[in-house]
Image (cartoon, coloured by chain):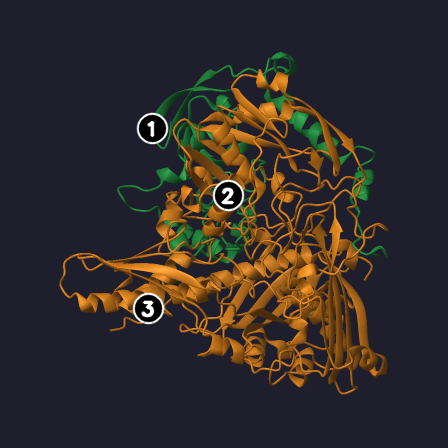
Chain colours: A orange, B green
Amino acid sequence: MTTNVIGKPLPRVDGRAKVTGVARYAADFNQPGQACAVIVGATVGLGRVTGIDTGPVEKMPGVIAVITHRNAPRLPYAPHKSYIDPATGERLHVLQDDHVRFYGQPVAVVVADTIEQAERGAAALHISYTPERPIIDPADAQALPVVPEAGKQPDARLPADTARGSADSALADAPMRVDEIYEIARENHNPMEPHATVAAWNGNRLTLWSKSQFVVNEQAEVAAVFGLPSENVQVICPFIGGAFGTTLRTWPHVTLAAMAARQVARPVKLVLTRKQMFFMTGHRPRTLQRMALGATVDGKLTCIVHEGTGETSRYEEFMEALTSVTTFLYSTPNVRTRYRLLPLDIGTPNHMRGPGEASGVFALECAVDELSYKLGMDPIDLRRRNEPAIDEGENRPFSSRSLMKCYDLAAERFGWSRRSPEPRSMRDGRLLVGMGVASASYPAFHAPASARARLLADGTAEVEVAASDMGPGTYTSMTQVAAETLGLPVERVCFSLGRSDYPPAPSHGGSWTMASVGSAVRAACLAVQKEAGKHPQSGRPIEAIASSQRDPDAAARFSMHAFGAVFAEVAVDPDVGTIRLRRAVGAYGIGRVVNPRLARSQCIGGMVGGMGMALMERTVLDSRDGRPVNAHMADYLLPVNLDIPQLEAHFVEELDPHVNALGVKGLGEIALVGMAPAIANAIFHATGKRVRASPIRIEDVLTV
Amino acid sequence: MKSEKPFSDDAVQIEQNCGGLSRRAILLTVGGVAALAAAPTAQSISERPPTASTGRVRLVVNGKPHELDLDPRRSLLDVLRETLDLTGTKKGCNQGACGACTVLLNDRRVVSCLTLAAMHDGAQIRTIEGLEANGELHPLQTAFVEHDGLQCGFCTPGQIMSGIGCIAEGHAGTPDEIRFWMSGNICRCGAYPGIVAAVADAAKRA
Ligand code: FES
Ligand code: FES
């Protein structure tokens, strides 16, 4: 029996909880007798803590404890690394020594009865340092790039160097050439919900109501830090107020919350301030990329050279897929990529929506656009001309690739034919109007996951996975998968997530939740049905756990990616340089769409994020001490309602039987990738001015 | 022109551009002025010892009267969330810059994180928890679900309270007007088109 609920644009099953304030996020889990903790961060960018005057603060009303490296327990910090932690280096051991590695690093925690008392105590705590000169600016002569350790292995997922053919000599010989430097600013995720943890001990068992995109890893990480058996730690996170990658890792504040709760023998709530989220919980690393394209006069790419460097901390090597897409987006015999890291005195960066791809594709797609103007060729025609039949980097066929279909669909919806090719040739009154396009791509990952399904005597079903929902609609889409597999109406299925004692799921990132968790949900539902067949009319609940992973045969045979085409129109005021996005259309080939209503929202959200990347977002560090000077929601510019015009997201029909049983490729990241270069290219079309750094600001186009 | 240096960093320049005053100093100055204007006297602030002296404040929250002993530093947001455990109202920035904490105070929308509860003795407060009537959602709540004006849902209580204010003020006549008057509520998930559609829809029904 099937109810055909996969593919239906159902409203969110958790919509009512969210519009009534019933949905509870980490900081909403107030516990009886709870105390409040506030972190004090270092005010130097590098050095040693030489003195902490805890006495006066300890005497302040309501203050229960001031924890510093001097009185903090020495924690076991057993080795633990998940795949979302940098492969090389060691995590920050918080309050374990006097060393300050970056501005804002936690150096003390004040615990008090109320938030006001803890904040007052934290503000009054006097700390002295022996500062050293940190290296913050990548242009600093002492900032030296390194080859990422994990990229050296021949089978590395993110290889430091790749080459096919001889790209450099092909570049030297190429009749047409683009060879430019592109710079992507440091960005902060800035989800609306600040990181928060409520920690409560019961003997040597610890419960954490904690914002996490990976509850089973948070459990394992905290257990390792405190030297506890994993089962003694329970992480609960039913709702996430946006995250975009920032809570994939478990950051030191979670440890601090647990440490404080143990110290004061009370439950403790610790919420990061907005300012602290600019240096304590990762960021999209600044990158500098050289992108060089060689082509024949009729627009056939002869080579690509892509050399990228991303910043990282001094204690961990954070890597992202900066150069990956370059190896397969176009057909060309000669490609060389190089990826390096620049260790600086900053906190470790981490994955931010479209990690690596968003930055790498910006450079690639702006360079291709530049080439199209040099050739006098329509940028879509240029891409069509170089559309590969297979993944030439891996020399394997794509499981499916609908990029050109995406261009066709989006071009028609956008009205690309109305564009006049010359830069500065389109106007609306005084305003310069420009249209630009860019391709988007992101891998169709699939990680092992498991799920539990239970059929109850009343004809309803319960499904549980330690998955997360930071906003895409995991609750809804998994309910649809379960309902369809079980042949039940959605109202009879209850899907639960966000507890570490549920069957394990992979991290909620990398656009793989639908594929991984969805396949596990389907497998568990099939298993429980089989079980039910064995015991008809038992009258008792029937339960089954099942796991799923990608078919290794398919994984070996195919290259699996989602593709998309993004079109943007901007208007630039030639006198004052203001840039406005007027409209954008994206079309995506992402396999099967489980819920078009939610998928559309997710895509539009990604486009809004890409618009922020293109025109607004940039965390500026004071190069003297690494202090973010715009660590405020009003100073870190990001799109508000008035910045966002009509945005359209479309999906091309794409059947991919190879990626997984559901035929889904995932959508979270690709929705952002492509938007920023499309806007940059539209700005060039409007103004004739090529800006190769994000964000593109008024001053960049003011001289047009 | 961008500097030739890779990763040009113009933080220092920003500070210089502020006429010798650091940006931080300017913010502190502005903040100080605001505090003085709001307080009874400047002296009473500086001389008050940092104790947790409490004051009695009466608030009517969602129709229910409360008489509370409050730390005078406590924001209305923390009164709702921490004192009354009404956690539907969210703290997104505590800086008055995101709108997640928007509630109606005597029918006007305010950011409750920058509103000291002690200054609003006797006020009527309406929060997201007070919108449902007899199990029926408020039309704007329904519209948010129908138009998918949310993803993670964290900004949503603030958006809805702000949307109610926006409609009541007569600022929901056109989509552009809604965009303008709803721009104090950031949605990092980027659900803006759905938010505008929801407010427009509810405004029509109102
Ligand atoms: S929490 Fe009040 S405006 Fe952000
Ligand atoms: S729905 Fe996530 S911030 Fe608005």
Q: Position of residue A701 (x, y in %)?
A: 78, 59
Report the amino acid beneath label 3. Answer: Val
Do marks 2 and 3 share a subunit?
Answer: yes
Answer yes or no: do the residues labelled 3 and 1 have beta carbons within 8 Å?
A: no
Left/right placement of residue A204 relative to residue A624 reads left
The numbered dot on residue B64 is: 1
B94 relative to B147, above or below: above
Q: The N terminus of chain A is located in which quarter?
A: bottom left
Q: Residue at x 35, y 46 (%)?
A: B138
Would you say residue A41 is visible in this rendering? Answer: yes
Image depth: mark 2 or mark 3 in front: 2
Q: Quadrant of residue B124?
A: top left
Answer yes or no: do the residues labelled 1 and 2 have beta carbons within 8 Å?
A: no
- The residue at which mark 3 appears reads as A5
Out of A365 and A121, give the one closest to the viewer: A121
Image depth: mark 1 or mark 2 in front: 2
- Say which element carries label 3: loop
Report the amino acid beneath label 1. Answer: Lys
B161 relative to A13, above or below: above
- The residue at which mark 2 appears reads as A222
A655 relative to B60, above or below: below
Q: Residue at x 49, y 70 (%)?
A: A665
